[in-house]
Amino acid sequence: MTTSRFRYIQSVAAGGFKNMAVDEILLDECRRGAIDGVLRVYQWAPPAVSLGHGQSTDLLDLRACEKLGIDVVRRITGGGAILHWEEITYCLVLGRETLPVLKWPRQFARLMGVALCEALSSLGVDASLSPGETRATLEDTRSSRGTRSSLSLGEALRTPEDARSCHGTGSFHGAQSSLCFSSGAENEVVVGERKLAGCAHKFTREAFFSHGSIMTGYAHLRIVDLVRPEVGSITMSALGERSVCLSDLLQTVPSIETVGHELRKGIENSFGVLLEEGRLSDREEELAGERALTKRNDMEASRGIGGTRSNGSESGRDTDTDTDRSNGRGKGIGRDRDRGRGSSRDMGRDSGIVTPPRVSG
């Protein structure tokens, strides 16, 4: 591949609606040709649950989420629900015309996995890519030119094997299949047989898109407390047997700056691009604020919560980065952590569940 120039952005921690809105706007801007590509790394404050594009909110006990100060937001990608807590998240957007050699969704997913493994190897983690099915969404939507743009499997995928390995979004049945870290997909990052990073991709005529979570601690396991009993049951220990985190693999959990630096190098090597330090443009910030407000109002409307929020209130909530919020504390979560009950190390004792064993890396 020829070397191209793209942006690298490390964002401040933000709420779930703002984070997902920024990812969506970056994809939109890439699709209309305004940007060539972006790698963004970020964190969540307070913690939030993101649902796959086709998942119903019926999966979750929404009152329990609200009580803990945990927002519920919908992604534009498929896959299972994730509690974003104690993790470092990435988003990669690449324009298809800027990298003509990069033609096929499966090729993109593979290169993304290789970049993640290279970054983790630089940190001292012996990670590999899993077999299985690539988690991808093939979009059928209006193009930036305003005409109907249907991306068929035949157009998007190179071989019958590609068609079988890329699947669209849909409903999930049962708690186990509804949670991201209780199931696997092709080209996801694992240590042994345990998932370290959950990834999901979206492909359109104009762009490739991927975002994913690299777990730094075990707090994401607490999603089992947020799943409605009628959906099914899965314990923290059972979910923990399927996932692993950096706090178990390394003596010291690396900072977002360190992880972002290594992931940046991995992306550059895998895709043959040059990522220049940058930030969101004023236009991107404005559009993301509007999109975050829309996403919040849409979610609240789907839950039967009346009223709408203004841009001011949404912006204030999602950009607040004081000490408590930047440490990942929601309402009840912050108080529990202050009393020593909210950390991933302690939650096993509180729930009668043994914290997952340490895995050598």
Image (tube, helix red, strand yellow):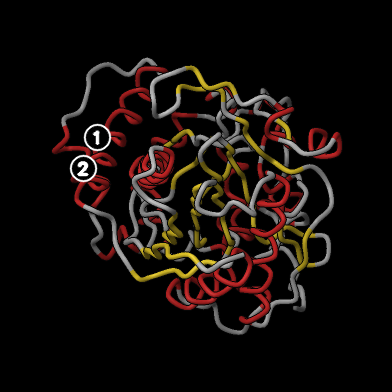
Front-most of 8 and 217? 8
Disc 1, SS: helix
Front-most of 348 and 85? 85
Which amino acid type corresponds to the residue marked 1 in the rendered image? Glu
Front-most of 4 and 26? 4
The percent position of residue 65, horizontal first and vertical second, equals 45, 37
Disc 2, SS: helix
Name above or below for residue 243 compared with residue 182.
Answer: below
Where is mark 1, residue-wise? 290
Q: Residue at x 50, y 58 (%)?
A: 90
**Location of residue 111 (image quadrant):** bottom right
Name above or below for residue 61 compared with residue 127.
Answer: above
Mark 1 vs 2: CB contact within 8 A: yes
Q: Is residue 192 left or right of residue 209?
A: right
Q: Is residue 235 left or right of residue 255?
A: right
Q: CA distance from mark 1 to mark 2?
A: 6 Å
Q: Residue at x 38, y 47 (%)?
A: 19
The percent position of residue 345, horizontal first and vertical second, equals 58, 67
The percent position of residue 196, horizontal first and vertical second, equals 68, 61
Mark 1 Cα-neighbour bin, 10 Å: few <14, some 14–19, many ≥20: some
Which amino acid type corresponds to the residue marked 2 in the rendered image? Glu
Whether residue 358 is visible: yes
Mark 2 Cα-neighbour bin, 10 Å: few <14, some 14–19, many ≥20: some
Where is mark 2, residue-wise? 286
**Location of residue 29 (image quadrant):** top left
Which residue is situated farthest in the left direction here? 312
